[in-house]
Amino acid sequence: MITNMIRFIIILIQRYEHTEANMALSFMEGNEALARGAIAAGCNFFAGYPITPATTIFNNMLKMLPARGGICLQGEDEIASMGYCIGAAMAGKKAFTATSGPGISLYSEQISFAIGSEIPLVIADVQRLGPSTGSATKGADSDIQFLQWGSTGGVPVIVLAPKDALDCYLLAIHAFNYAEEFRCPVFIASNKEIGMTKESFDLESVLLPPIVERKMFEGDNYLPFAAEPDEAPPFLPIGGKTLVRQTSSTHGPDGFITNDPEVIARNQDRLRRKILSACNRITLFEEDIQSQSDTLIISYGVTARAVEDASRILAGAGRPVSTLTLKSLWPVPEELLQEKAKSFKRIVVFEMNLGQYVHEIRRVLGDKKVGFFGQMNGVLITPAQIMEVIGNA
Amino acid sequence: MHSFLNTSRPPVYCPGCTHENITSNLDRAMVSLNLPAEKTVMVTDIGCSGLFDTFFNVHALHGIHGRALTYAAGLKLADPELHVIVTMGDGGLGIGGAHVLAACRRNLDLTLIILNNFNFGMTGGQYSVTTPTDAVVGSEFLNQAEIPIDICGIAESAGATYVARCSGLDKDLPEIIADGINHKGFAIIETLGMCTGRYTKKNRLSPKILDQMVEDLPARSGLVERNIRPEYGERYRALCKEKNIFPEAITVEKEISLLDYQHQEVAILGSAGMRIVTAGDIVCHAGLSAGMNVSMKNDYNITVLRGQSVSEILISPQKIGYIGSNSPTVVLALSDEGVQQRKKIFATLQPKTFVIKEKSVDIPETPAEVVEVDFKELKIVKQDWALAALCLMAKKEKAINREMLGIALQARLKGKAYAGAMVIAEKIFGLNTL
């Protein structure tokens, strides 16, 4: 956790520095930044299906992947797009797909397969208000609980949350790294307001995380799901010299269906432990702790930017508040939340929905007073609204 | 004799089930082709046909119901050397119908063997998309109100290049399957079989009746001449080869130093067809040329050629937090539709906010400084009003100046578009009345 924190603090310092002469700023929407981050992470396969506000990730991948020798497909539907990614990932590719909430619904069964059968994938969810057409495509952080619980099996997943275009780029790299290391689908919970907003950022000044590659099996007698109790199994591709079995059925280490309750339980426990035991290492966040403040605002995603503005204005007015911006939402960074909240009298959570992640924060900080403000009307929460809530709460 | 069959996991089918015969004949076909095991993968889905991957000593991917063709396509495109054999029942055929159609249209080199035994064996003999109307199955009367599909006919009309149909007990099965695997492109082989655990308990079916059914249906014996075309993977790779230029990200260097530049919020309120998004991009580029941070949020109708088009741009020497507009410093009111979308802001504008209003546009009451322009009289066409308004902004040094705009126009517009913009710029900057 310390390393991650230092890494983000360095990034922060670099980001806040005033623009130097002759420095070139990148200018792109969050979706393009996400696509470029994926390329930087070594992504070489994409399959997706058009959906506002995620389509431009697909458009960008389609422009970039062929030039890099990669493959980019439009599936006949979302279910197929996920299937193509699963097949490609099992052949050794770094696979990526992008959709919005309605697409996640359709991905769901394939996601359950990918989680239970340890198939590395990155899934961008550019969130919106809901199903159907029209204002449904406006921004919201509508899928925060859905991403964790929208699959059968109830196994922990990894969900990262960017707040701006630069985060889209950086978190795409983290997402691929986590997918490779933990052999699981990793979600990037973006938002229409990030994905389709164009903005400038300074890519040159940030430290990119080193690229993590899938751990390959070495030795004889490969059992595709034999692993340490809290790790993902080493990988071999379908199509390599050693025969590989992949299965959606409940399986033992050999990849064959099993009815043995002990074997089933051991595997389920491992799927859980490989994520939860690495929780602190997975955790990504930014913080701004003001020593004279008694209030900690916790937020994530695009809302965190309004929180930062509000906190700057409040500090200027002599009423400082502290802020914690979560960049990884699942697994819930329980230790971090407890540690950061310890010295504060009051915690207030802001999110662009009717109250989803606040349930996790209340669960973890059971003894604290946790206030909440959210809205689900397609409109960004403003700094003024945040200050009003802080002033009145 | 060489065999791919996994002797430690022999088939486990009900006595008399046709699947067992198809298993051994698929093995014969694979042996006859001398397929390399490490370059062969069996892809299956759910149901009795989904057990096939466990019987063979090749790579295996056993996925979820009806989606086998999707994994198969991912595998084949990722590793073109793979021989990909897919088995699917009539259940998977129904639930995964879109994938079968897509595979036919695409013609990727996969082999699909459909094990049609007219019902869902594993879940209790319910009717499927191939159950005859007069059959007695586990779905009470439901199948009597529907008709079965002829998947071979569908496949042919969907563009399949190889379609074969036979009894699962056909003595030529190894050759038929081998021929399908050998076909370069998507091959679909429908086998008709007996589900002895469920279907034949209440429906008369025998090897002879299966033969008769095949004969009664339109003959399908392999290559479909009218659909012959290049294999998808080869075609895909050939097309990709031409796309060899990687689109680098747009970066903008700081060329101008401005003293005391204050945070600006520009709202461009227009309609579809008025190049509002392009204008927003130009404003951003202008800001970037002065080393500023910028952000741009666009709002337009889902039917892109009608309705409002609104672009909201922030330009700031500080890092931009909240990306919505708090209080615009410049508003370009270029169409009633655009103004209607943001009508609430006008009453809240500061007196120093600079509003450009085209003569034909109505705006609500506002304390802001309003400049009315008659672009029509200046013979500027509607598509160029946003651009003309940017020139006026620059002329009045609101949010951008002439130098910034010049850099942005040069960078963002090419050829005729740039020349046209220059004409408009000269017109606006040369006017003494504005």
Image: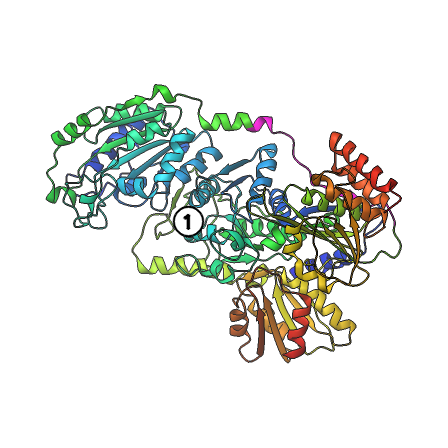
- Expressed as whole percent of the image width and height from the top left, the position of residue B226 reads 36, 20
Residue A78 position (above or below residue B370): above
Up the image or down, A151 lies above or below A246; here it is below
Disc 1 packing (10 Å; few <14; some 14–19; many ≥20)? many
Q: Is disc 1 placed on a helix, strand or loop?
A: helix
Q: Residue at x 41, y 40 (%)?
A: B71
Residue A66 lies in the magenta-colored region: no
Q: Residue furthest top?
A: B225
Q: Quadrant of residue B6?
A: top left
Q: Position of residue A351 (x, y in %)?
A: 58, 65
Instruction: Give the image quarter of residue B229.
Output: top left
Magenta stretch, main secondary structure, is: loop
Chain of the residue where label 1 is placed in the rendered structure? A
Is residue A384 in sight in this rendering?
Answer: yes
Q: Quadrant of the N terminus of chain B?
A: top left
Q: Position of residue A251 (x, y in %)?
A: 35, 51
Bounds of the magenta segment: B240-257
Does the magenta portion include B242? yes
Query: Is A7 rendered above or below residue B72?
Result: below
Give the residue type that dot 1 points to: Gln
Colour scheme: rainbow
Q: Nearer the viewer, residue B151 or B412?
A: B412
Residue B294 image offset from top left, x and y in percent: 74, 52
The number of numbered badges drawn on the structure is 1
* Side of B297 where B425 appears, left or right: right
Is B370 situated above or below B202? below
Q: Is residue B9 left or right of residue A371?
A: left
Would residue A246 be found to the left or right of residue A387 on screen? left
Name the residue at 38% across, 31% down. Answer: B104
Q: Which residue was labeled with disc 1?
A: A110
Q: Answer whether residue A2 is visible to the viewer in this image.
A: no
